[in-house]
Amino acid sequence: MLYSFHGKIFVEITVGYTLGLDLTTSRFFILKHPDGVGSNHMLSYADSGLYLVNAKGFQLTVWLHNLMGDDDDDDAGGWMLVDTFCVHEACKRVVGDRWVPRVGDCVDIVAVGDNAEFLFLVHEPSTAILYVHLRSRVVEKVYDKHAFGHIRIFPLMMIWPPVFPALNE
């Protein structure tokens, strides 16, 4: 996946690493992911850097890498763990009757909002798509996909209520 934030472009080159290109200096750099981050993760724009949200089983970890300085720290030391959350109990509550926990059961990250405020997860055994608001720890089932296959979600954030321009009469 390709991400663009603060005049920098990021693309994951392999499990454990993200390649960055600073468009102002035309310089490439590599960000090594923190230990324990697997392939089930996504990046998210942050006001001062980049969030990495990882899911392992039902455990979510949120990491922040500050990118506002002149130097881009290319090792895992640049990442700071900012949050952890286990969605297991919430999954049992929102999935309901179709919850059948099995060994190896997990959730997959489908999309992450700006500043890692919220994310969408898919729980394949129950075919549920879950919305997780990380700050309030709210987990809601928002869709039941009924069929297996690739899901794409593009979160959109906007002001509410929307303000429309006045009509000219």
Image (tube, rainbow, N blue to C red):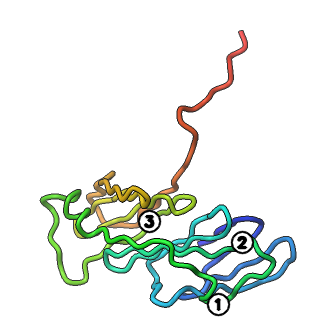
Which residue in the structure is indicated by mark 2?
9
Question: Extreme right residue here?
Answer: 25
Left or right: 157 in relation to 130: right
Locate residue 32, reporting x and y percent.
61, 88
- Image quarter (top left, top right, bottom left or bottom right) of the N terminus: bottom right
Label 1 close to label 3 by CB (< 8 Å)? no
Label 2 close to label 3 by CB (< 8 Å)? no
Sequence order check, earlier mark of 1 and 2: 2
**Which residue is at a point 63% across and 83% down the rendered structure image?**
78
Label 1 close to label 2 by CB (< 8 Å)? no
In the rendered image, which quarter is residue 119 located in?
Answer: bottom left
Examine the rendered structure and indicate whether residue 52 appears above or below residue 38. Answer: above
Q: Badge 3: how crowded within 10 Å, few (<14), some, or many (20+)?
A: some
- Image quarter (top left, top right, bottom left or bottom right) of the C terminus: top right
Closer-to-camera residue (150/169): 169
> In the structure shown, which secondary structural element does the residue marked by tag 1 occupy?
loop
Look at discs 1 and 2 and give the one toward the viewer. 1
Which residue in the structure is indicated by mark 3?
110
Q: On residue 75, which mark appears? A: 1
Locate residue 118, reporting x and y percent.
46, 58
> In the structure shown, which secondary structural element does the residue marked by tag 2 occupy?
strand
Examine the rendered structure and indicate whether residue 83 appears above or below residue 32. Answer: above
Look at discs 1 and 3 and give the one toward the viewer. 1
Q: On residue 127, which mark appears? A: none
Q: CA distance from mark 1 to mark 3?
A: 26 Å
Q: CA distance from mark 2 to mark 3?
A: 20 Å
**Which residue is at a point 57% across and 70% down the rendered structure image?**
51
